[in-house]
Image: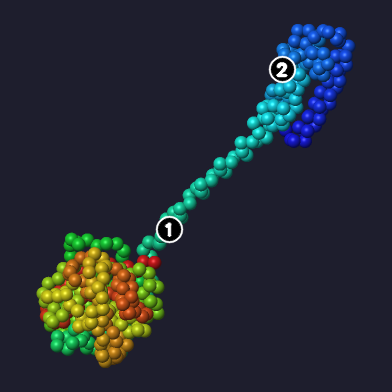
Amino acid sequence: MRSSDVVRRVSSLNSILGATLALLLTAGCDTPAGVEGEGGNAPGEPTGGTRGTGGHVGSGGTLGSGGTLGSGGIPGSGGIPGSGGILGSGGILATGGRLGSGGILGSGGTVSSGGTLGIAGMPGSGGRLGSGGTLASGGMLGSGGRLGSGGTPGSGGIRGSGGVTPGSGGASSSGGAGGHPPQGGSGGTAGPVSCTASPLSGGTQHCSSNSTGNVGSLSYSIWSSGSGGCITTYGAGAAYKATWNNSGDFLAGCGFQWNETQTYDQYGTLSADYAYTKSGSAGGWSYIGIYGWSNNPLIEFYIVDDWFGSGPPTGGGTLKGTFTADGGTYKVYQHQQNNQPSIHGTTTFQQYFSVRQTARQCGHISLTDHFKEWASLGMPLGKMASARLLTEAGGGSGSIDYSSANMTAAK
């Protein structure tokens, strides 16, 4: 009930009580002076009500016994006029029965005392359902590669080696006639390889001292400073077989061929998986792993996971740092080639090497991790020209046969 209604009720009650009091006083004046009655009024008392029980006015009727007006919280409840004797004793308005006290309107407090409904929290307080993140954020799986536009055969001689010639303190870098290889793709067959896979059979053999070509979306390359050698491409990812026989500095590989327009990170996350067997010898030096070039700056780079003979090799360079990748420890070397053949003619350029300290013949290589590590050591790459699974031998007679090999560029 609103406070204005309470005021009106109280005002009305006062009027009724005033009228009642007037009647009682009048009746009291007509009563014989000596009669009090049982529990009656003393002469001259102005209440007109029975003192004690019942509240008879000269044996009259009870005045409002039980609290007629608004029992249960109406003004006067718990304090009936005349109840217990003198009018208002224990029941005078505002005595033991003030507004809001002991059963008056709002007994126990104003309406809604105790708090607004719903205090202690709006429904749902504590957070929105599902907060914590978007499901399945991540990346796209294994986007393939674009087949390149091809290259234009011509003069210029691609250098692909960089191996250290015994006693020279640098890399043997004999040039060769030929031209830029076709621009391969950035794809490849994704997934790990089997370290116990059986050797592949068939394939197409290419014997030359300088030859390149496509294998699906990838590209193969063979180069030597001497009598040449052979590469057999199987058409199964980057798998191939290479053979050499006193071929001087001999290189063979299969993988990515690009057009020097993008940095490595623009191709996505680059990686390789491989398994192979090897036999024979490789002369004074050898590298098995990843090999490639970038331009601006012009860099010849290696990631070496294995070698023939004793090792690990150093590339004739200066140690720049050590880091861990793909479950192994690699040492990083840098070496300068002075006036040596390159993919852009005879010039001076830098060589980068990551050399695994424990050789292996099956595994995964995270090319991107190596490139990032080199950059942190002040050895940046430029726009990418190539990156292939490599075999390089500095002489001798031998072979290497990849039973399984993949190279991927995943965006």
The location of residue 378, given as percent across then percent down, is 33, 79
Nearer the observer, 93 or 35: 35
Q: Residue at x 12, y 75 (%)?
A: 310
Can you identify the residue that label 2 sits on?
84
Is residue 91 in sight in this rendering? yes
Q: Quadrant of residue 220?
A: bottom left
Crowd around label 1: few <14 · some 14–19 · many ≥20 (10 Å): few
Q: Residue at x 32, y 71 (%)?
A: 368
Crowd around label 2: few <14 · some 14–19 · many ≥20 (10 Å): many
Tell me the tag on residue 191.
none
The location of residue 187, given as percent across then percent down, is 34, 69
Q: Residue at x 17, y 69 (%)?
A: 358
Residue 209 against residue 42 in the figure, above or below: below
C-alpha span from label 1 to label 2: 80 Å
First along the sequence among labels 1 and 2 = 2
Nearer the observer, 27 or 285: 27
Q: Is residue 67 left or right of residue 44?
A: left
Q: Residue at x 14, y 85 (%)?
A: 166
Q: Quadrant of residue 1?
A: top right
Tell me the tag on residue 137.
1
Q: Is residue 380 left or right of residue 321?
A: right
At mark 2, the secondary structure is loop
Is residue 225 in sight in this rendering? no
The location of residue 157, given as percent across then percent down, is 28, 87
Mark 1 belongs to which amino acid? Ser
Classify the position of the C terminus by image quarter: bottom left
At mark 1, the secondary structure is loop
The location of residue 216, given as percent across then percent down, is 31, 70
Q: Quadrant of residue 390?
A: bottom left
